[in-house]
Image (cartoon, rainbow, N blue to C red):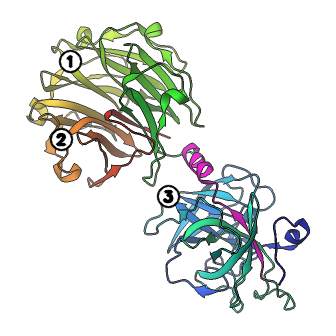
Amino acid sequence: MLRITPRSPRIAAGLTAVVATGLLSSGSALAAIGTPDTGTHAYTARITVGDEATARGCSATLIAGDWLLSAKSCFGADVAAGAPKLPVKAIVGDKTYAVTELAPRTERDVVLLHLDKVVVGVTPARLGSTVPPTEAAVTAAGHGRTKTEWVPGKIHTASFKTTAQDATTLALESTGQGSTICQGDAGGPVLNAAGELVALNSRSWQGGCLGTDPAETRTGAIAARTDDLAAWIMQTRTAAHGWKTGAVVTSGSTLFQGIRLADGTWTDFADVRTKASDIGGIRTAAAAGVGSDTHVLAIATNGTLQHTVRKADGTWVPFGNVGDVAGHLGSLTQITAVSIGNDLHVVAVANGKVFHTLRTAGGHWTPFGDLSTVAGPIGTVTHAAIASVDGALQVVTVSGGKAHHSLRTPSGHWSRWGDVAQAAGPTGPITGIAIAGVDGDAHVIVATDNGTRQHHAIRKANASWERFGELTGYLGNVTSKSVSATHVNGELQLIAVTADNKVVHTVRHADRTWNTTPVTLPGVTGTLGAVSITGTL
């Protein structure tokens, strides 16, 4: 039996990319030689490239809620990153999605496809992290032809074994029973014995496939490796345009940053000082999204206020001392930040007072101003939070265990402090506060009774209030140490660090339902402290 090895350019070049051309019906699914699938491999998608009359067909593999992996050869010789040149549709399960962005891998037959929305009802394939050894059993799946059917209409699977591997490919050979990878299977998954994705169908001799030369009996194939692409996949996903949640959390004197993607998965959390610059220990921090960038304000253990930016491409700007440009504040205890347009607004609690500055889109900082001079005195302030609501900056503070509210109009005018309890109802003594603007409303969350209870109220766009309601039914019986809220894609997101050193995250959807999940923090160790989240595009 002839063994196809990727180290043999002459033989490998003879294999044909398994891309279906001239589809008879772009509305019908295509499938592969082997055994019809019973639903185990539902993450095997079908894609069509081009207009309906002339579309090419391939397979693809769902690897995240809104991302597919497929074969770059499906898109022709000139595949560029960004929006596809031709319309691309993907069928996952029983639903059709549009592909909005391509991210090709330069050195192998692999491309990432970004979908227009998150897939529901289908669990993505698990990524393997080890290349299968020679003679390892693998399973291939796809939507390509079979021996007898041009358009089978269902996923098929087939058994193979590996015969060789190099840095970018696996060589496969049929284990018998007529297994072959056919036209339309390109981009379908190749799975190891544990059911993990390790490669994608790429090229094949196509022996026995419908429409091929009957004299061709070879069934060998070449697959593009994916087992070493996890870091590239995550980097591409985080850099892509679209709503994400950026989070920073302190652990001891270290600050970590991570990103929650559209499908709810989180990246690893990285030490911010190793990414930006080392400013020594950090007491607390706040994050604010400005477009696709994440701005981070940190109070260092030496008492200075520092500022850095995580750019959309994942690079960081070195920390800079805000006090040098906006004025030094003594006894800083808390910081909060939000964007309005491309301006960054920052509110700091220092010496029991509240101060405000803003950084313009051009990078200019205004001097810190004492809000008691424009909004009135409210006693010693322990906590503050800010939000952007219809172009206005809304501020909530805690003084004497009570919440107060003020706002800064787009013209720069400040309202006098108002007692939130008078408008939204009484609560126990407040020990934490957060606010976020969603569709003209300001959502206020308070932690009370030493963090053992959490409450939610809404200041409506017409300045009326929906009264506080407890969140126990959504968050569970937690004791919160730190809470933060933000707006992400028309929804309220809330995150809390709990007294048992855990993190919970919840989303309040537009229909007023809540979805709460625990958050693991890959890369973070030690005792958690303050947390802050923000939305970015």
Task: Please give the residue where the numbered disc 1 appears in the rendered image.
Answer: 381
Q: Which mark is residue 117?
A: 3
Q: Position of residue 287 (x, y in %)?
A: 41, 30
Alpha carbon distance from label 1 to label 2:
20 Å
Q: What are the residue bounds of the magenta stretch?
A: 219-239
Out of 362 and 382, give the one closest to the viewer.
Answer: 382
Q: Amino acid at mark 1?
A: Val
- Alpha-carbon neighbours of circle 3 within 10 Å: few (<14), some, or many (≥20)? some
Q: How would you rate the neighbour count of disc 1 (Cα within 10 Å): few for under 14, some for 14-19, many for 20 or more?
A: many
Residue 405, by quadrant, is top left
Q: Residues within 10 Å of mark 2 (few under 14, many from 20)?
A: many
Task: State the SS at label 1.
Answer: strand
Inter-mark Cα distance, 3 to 2: 32 Å
Q: Quadrant of residue 436?
A: top left
Figure check: 279 above or below 258: above
Q: Regarding mark 3 in the picture, which secondary structure is present there? A: loop
Is there any visible trace of residue 180 in the rendered image?
A: yes
Point out which mark residue 454 bears.
2
Give percent across and percent down for residue 440: 32, 38
From the viewer's perspective, tell me whether residue 535 is left or right of residue 418.
right
Secondary structure at badge 2 equals strand
Q: Earlier in the sequence, mark 3 or mark 1?
A: 3
Q: Residue at x 82, y 77 (%)?
A: 3
Which residue is depicted at the point 74% across and 51% down? Answer: 80
User: For this rendering, which residue is in front, 126 or 325?
Assistant: 126
Q: Residue furthest front?
A: 134
